[in-house]
Image (cartoon, rainbow, N blue to C red):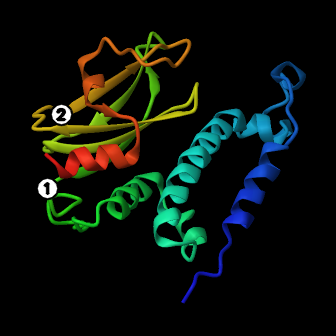
Amino acid sequence: MKFGISANIIRSQFAGVAQLDRVSVYETEGQGFDSLRPRQRLNLDWYEQRWTQNAHIKRKLVGHISDRIGSEYRDQLWCLNYEDLWELAVGVSAPEVAITLGSGSDFSNGYDAKFAIARTHSYGKSYSALINCRNKQQIIAGVYERLQQQFYWFVFRDFDVKEISIPFDVDSGEPKFDNRNWQHCYPTIESAVGAMLNS
């Protein structure tokens, strides 16, 4: 049975929120939070950045999955978080392996899927995606950089560290290729999956 929810409805609701009135904090000084218009009171500028980046990520991954298994589940896929979508995106690209959730690794070949978003750190002085790999040594990772709205795909083998940092320029979002972790980057999801399968 198909779910009765439409991703178009969800997206239209987000679009409606994005149109709420902006108001200067100076116009409401001393009036209390109740008098602020919804956008100011709820700090929607911050959430708009989040739903915009999440929409970009979901559009990319849902498109990749649907291109390979058909559009039957496209609306349902939009209801998943991007970590789940990344696991499925790898799974549909690697028919040789099975998704084995809850068995110590995400895939039957011992790899785990991780997805990270570049964020500022150290009070805005650095900008990187941090891939959590505690107790994980075989990682296939997706990274999203929001300034340039770009995706990057990585495969890490035999890494015995708690976290892998993928650095970017804090102003432009350009990759900092002098960092050795960029040696593990692949141009497409398919090439990253191929490297995973050949390891």
Q: Which residue is mark 1?
A: 110
Relative to residue 9, is residue 27 drawn left or right?
Answer: right
Q: CA distance from mark 2 to mark 1?
A: 17 Å
Label annotation for residue 86: none
Q: Is residue 67 or residue 82 the one in the foreground?
A: 67
- Identify the residue at image location x=64%, y=34%: 46
Specify which label sits upstream in the sequence, 2 or 1.
1
What's the amino acid at mark 1? Gly
Relative to residue 161, is residue 184 drawn left or right?
Answer: right
Extreme residue toward the bottom, this view: 1
Percent across and percent down for residue 160 are 10, 34
Instruction: Name above or below for residue 172 compared with residue 184.
Output: above
Q: Quadrant of residue 100?
A: bottom left
- Identify the residue at image location x=32%, y=42%: 141
Q: Is residue 97 or residue 110 the one in the foreground?
A: 97
Q: Is residue 154 or residue 19 the one in the foreground?
A: 154
Percent across and percent down for residue 103 are 15, 65
Percent across and percent down for residue 90 are 34, 56
Relative to residue 69, is residue 26 drawn left or right?
Answer: right
Instruction: Name above or below for residue 39 compared with residue 175.
Output: below
Label annotation for residue 162: 2
* Element at label 2: loop
- Identify the residue at image location x=80%, y=32%: 32
